[in-house]
Image: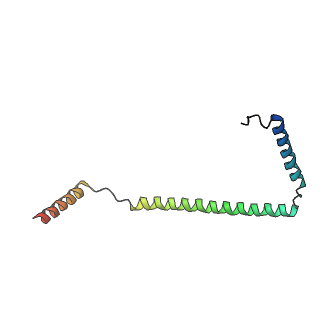
Amino acid sequence: MASYKDPSFEERTALARQAREKALAKLAAKPPLDPAVVAERQAAQAAREKAQAEKSAARKAAIAQAKADKQAAAAIAKPAPPTEAERKAARDERYAARKKRKG
């Protein structure tokens, strides 16, 4: 049965060092970016951000307008509560209709 010390600490550190050196060599071998390509990417990113900001502002304005319309409609369409006489008349109508159905 293999122990937890296989591979040894020295072997593991050597492997880690080799992997680190290999990654650094790969990164160093990468060609530098063309400034024109970098500028083009930055311009495209700025255009995307601007479009996203405009879309977000339009959505927020639409939500605010819908909320204002809803509040205005609620203020206008809200009926006054029925008076005691109106409630009594409605109750009497229901009673008369029920009595008519039964008899």
Relative placement, left or right, of 65 versus 77 is right
- Horizontally, residue 35 falls left or right of residue 91, namely right
Q: Residue 82 falls in which quadrant of the image?
A: bottom left
Where in the figure is residue 66, as x and y percent of width and height?
Answer: 51, 62
In front: 11, or 19? 11
Which residue shows up at 39% across the image and 62% down it? 77
22 vs 80: above or below:
above
Residue at image x 89%, y 52%?
28
| Above/below status of 4 relative to 58 | above
Q: Nearer the viewer, residue 28 or 82?
A: 28
Q: Residue at x 46, y 58 (%)?
A: 71
The tally of labels here is 0
Residue 58 % position (x, y): 61, 63
Most extreme residue toward the left is: 103
Residue for point 87% across, 59% down:
33
- Residue 47 x, y percent position in the rendering: 74, 63
Classify the position of the C terminus by image quarter.
Answer: bottom left
Res 81 quadrant in image: bottom left
Q: Position of residue 10 (x, y in %)?
A: 84, 35
Quarter the N terminus occupies:
top right
Instruction: Identify the image's colour scheme: rainbow, by chain, secondary structure or one colour.
Output: rainbow
